[in-house]
Amino acid sequence: MAGDFLAMRVKNGADIEQLDKLQETLTPDSQVLDAGCGSGVPVAEALQMAGHRVIGLDLSVGQLRLARQLAVGLEPVQADLAGLPFRDRSFDAVVSFYAVIHVPREEHLAVLTEFTRVLTHGGQLLVCMGCTDLPADHDPDSWLGAPMFWSHYDAATNIELFRAAGVEVTGSDEVPDPNGHGSHQFVLAVKP
C-alpha cells in the first residue's frame, strides 16, 4: 500500500504548513529526525528543501524503499518509535506525522519520552496526535486494502503526555486531515 498512499497523499495541505512554525525556530543545516517518515514525501522532502539534514525512521520496509528512491539525501533507518536507535541529544528537531496514532495509546508516553531523549536542549518537537478518545480501532482491510490500527487520547490528555515526557508545549492546533479523514492535533513543543 506504500505506493498507493504516496499517490493519494496531498503534498501541500494544512498539515505541511505546520512545518513553518517549526522552521521558524530552526537554524539552517539542523539535524532533524522524521519519525514515521513513510516515503519521505512530503515531510522529509520539505525539511531537506529548507536546508536541513534529515534522517527518516520507519518500521515499514516498503515505505523505506520508497524513501530511498524519492528523498535524495534522506538517510533511512528501520526501527520502532518506542526504541529509537540514536544516542541522547542527537537531533535539533523531531517531527512525526501520522505515525503515533498507529501505536497503542498506552505506549504514547514511551514514544514521546524517546523523542525527548534524542532531542538537544532547546530542541523542537512537532508531532501529529489524535484529537478524540479512541482506545483501539483495528480494521483488517479498510484502508487501501491493508490492515490498519489506530489508537489515541483526546487533545487535553495528549498535552499532559507531552508534559510528562519532559517538554514544554508551545502550540497545539487541530488540523484537517489532507485526505479527508477527520482532523488531527499537531503539537509543537521544546525541550528545556
Image (spheres, rainbow, N blue to C red):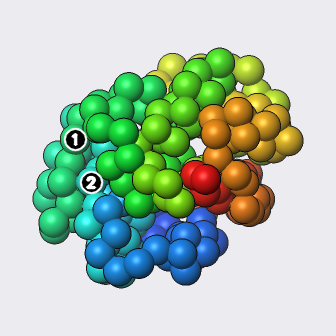
The picture quadrant where one finds residue 59 is: top left
Q: Look at 55% across and 70% down and name the residue there.
A: 22
Please determine whether, in this image, residue 24 is positioned above or below residue 16.
Answer: below
Disc 1, SS: strand
Q: Amino acid at mark 2?
A: Ile
**Residue 122 image offset from top left, x and y in percent:** 53, 60
Viewer-proximal residue among 31 and 139: 31
The picture quadrant where one finds residue 49 is: bottom left
99 sits left or right of 29 in the view: right
Please determine whether, in this image, residue 106 is positioned above or below residue 44.
Answer: above
Q: Quadrant of the N terminus?
A: top left
Viewer-proximal residue among 6 and 61: 61
Residue 16 visible? The answer is: yes
Q: Residues within 10 Å of mark 2 (few under 14, many from 20)?
A: many
The residue under label 1 is 77
Please determine whether, in this image, residue 42 is positioned above or below residue 121.
Answer: below
Q: Look at 18% across and 54% down and name the residue there.
A: 75
88 sits left or right of 186 in the view: left
Residue 4 visible? The answer is: no
The residue under label 2 is 55
Viewer-proximal residue among 151 and 5: 151
Q: Look at 70% across and 33% down and name the residue there.
A: 164
Q: Amino acid at mark 1?
A: Val
Q: Look at 32% across and 62% down and name the residue there.
A: 31
**Residue 158 image offset from top left, x and y in percent:** 75, 39
Callouts 1 and 2 close, C-beta under 8 Å: yes
Q: Could you say which disc has been placed on residue 129 in the image?
A: none
